[in-house]
Amino acid sequence: MEAATFKEADIKFLFDSQGFTCELPGDVEGSDLEISGSIITGDDRPRSIGYLRSTDPADNSELVFVGELKKDGIPISIYRYDEPDGIVLGFWHLGGGRYLTTFVDGTGGSGEERMQGVMDDLSVGMVSGLPVVLFSGDVRPGDVRDPMQRETIRAFGRGSVARDPIVELRREPPWTKESDSVRVGEPFSVAEGDVWVEASVTTRDSIRIGVKGPAESADEYRTAAGRAAETLKRSG
């Protein structure tokens, strides 16, 4: 990664109608984001929801097509894993080979009915080419106190199998303190025995920015995390 090369990218959290801009490392593809969060349904259980790069669900041999409906003009395909009480998934077709995906449990054979309830209580729109999820009824955003339920944006490096570096922005609880400086964490192992590190900083907007990749580039990741934090601002 070339530490001196940065470019402005448009980013947005899934449940936020207004986006941000910030400068990302030059070899990170900001236009190809993965955006995720959690929703809590009527049974008070969190479910992941994400805007992901994905292959067509029809090409997945483990899934069985259940049906299709349309909400707010957006086609939604319903699939079930081909097993007893299999998880039921809903795929909003958002164009460009991108899907907004969520799931419900299929226990008791009523997964399709539960998925219909989720569809009824969610509306999906697009802002500057990225999705925004709006809530009504019994469905609500995940609990920000749980790190696993927080809204997250990921942008990946281009051209390598490991897709390094990875830039991750995560919405923290509003009481989170702003960082005094960028911190580089302890090395950790990833696939095939590679050793990575993450440089991270939390902004005054309670957004944690992390840049991670192979440990030998730790100083570059520190610079990149600081640059993203300094340039992060609301769009418009």
Image: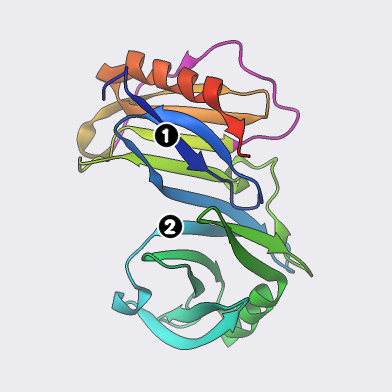
Q: In the image, residue 217 lies at what x, y percent?
A: 28, 19
The magenta segment is 171-190
- Tell me: 162 left or right of 47: left
What residue is shown at x 29% (from left), y 35% (from top)?
A: 164
The secondary structure type at the circle numbered 2 is strand
Q: Which quadrant of the figure contains the C terminus? A: top right
Which of the two residues, 125 or 140, is positioned nearer the viewer here? 125
List x then y, in percent, for residue 165.
32, 32
Check the image and report above or below for 126 versus 156.
below
- Quarter location, residue 154: top left
**Residue 167, label in figure:** 1
| Quarter occupied by residue 191 | top left
Nearest to N terminus: mark 2 or mark 1: 2
Q: Residue under circle 2? A: 52
Near mark 1 (Cα within 10 A), the count class, few <14, some 14-19 or many ≥20, is many
Residue type, numbered disc 1: Val
Asked if residue 81 is among those painted magenta in the image, a careful observer would answer no
Quarter residue 136 falls in: bottom right
Quadrant that contains the N terminus: top left
